[in-house]
Amino acid sequence: MLELRMWKAYYRRQPARLFGLLVQANREQAHASWPRALAAAALLARAAAAFGKTGWDGAAADAGLRDDPAYLRDIAHGYRLLGLPPGIDAAEVARRELRWWVVRRQIGLSAGKAAGEAIAALYAELYGVPLEAVAEAGRLRGEAAEVRDRGAADDQEGPRGRGAAYWPQVGRLLVASYRSLKAAIAPER
């Protein structure tokens, strides 16, 4: 699954790999042209990589760096390049995207529920659907994030290791999340 590979690249601090996977996702999921897919991936990867360097420990980096307006600009510009539908505010989508990143950092290993709520809010804004319609998709993705965080914290190989004990479960949760999201935004008639 592409999303799982992107998560692994992010957590293993492989920005070049993350960039390549983002290009692929932009082409496959957003149906973006090559130039737009490349430009959006560069912006989104830059935001994610920079945010990733802020550290999980509140003392590891200035907490203000987590709300850096540069992240918001890059995320919003990346989403705009992917061609948001009319009426969708890229700046608000960016705020909600960054919000779920920050929630996980602020709460730590038990952030699954709060992250899921933040992800659902992002989906509601991004797809222009009621929050209730995407709540389950958000919950499952937040749970995937918590499983990953707890698994990495307990893994003897460290957070950049193979993650054999947790990545399979993360993958299952992401698949379930995307099935739920698809049903919410494009219900079968």
Image (cartoon, rainbow, N blue to C red):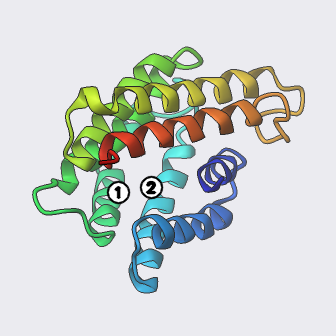
Which residue ends up furthest to the left in the rendered image? 87
The image's mark for residue 75 is: 1
For the question of whether residue 65 can be seen, the reply is: no
Instruction: Identify the residue at horizontal 24%, vertical 63% (top origin).
Output: 84
Q: Nearer the viewer, residue 119 or 153?
A: 119
The numbered dot on residue 163 is: none
Label total for image: 2
Q: Looking at numbered disc 2 in the image, what kind of residue is underneath it?
A: Ala
Please report whichever mark, 1 or 2, sits nearer to the chain's N-terminal start.
2
Q: Position of residue 130 (x, y in %)?
A: 20, 33
69, 91: nearer the viewer? 91
**Location of residue 17 by image quarter:** bottom right
Res 47 label: 2
Please name whichever residue, 171 or 150, is drawn nearer the observer in this view of the structure. 171
Residue farthest toward the front in the current orientation of the protein: 189
Which amino acid, mark 1? Answer: Ile
**Mark 1, secondary structure of its residue:** helix
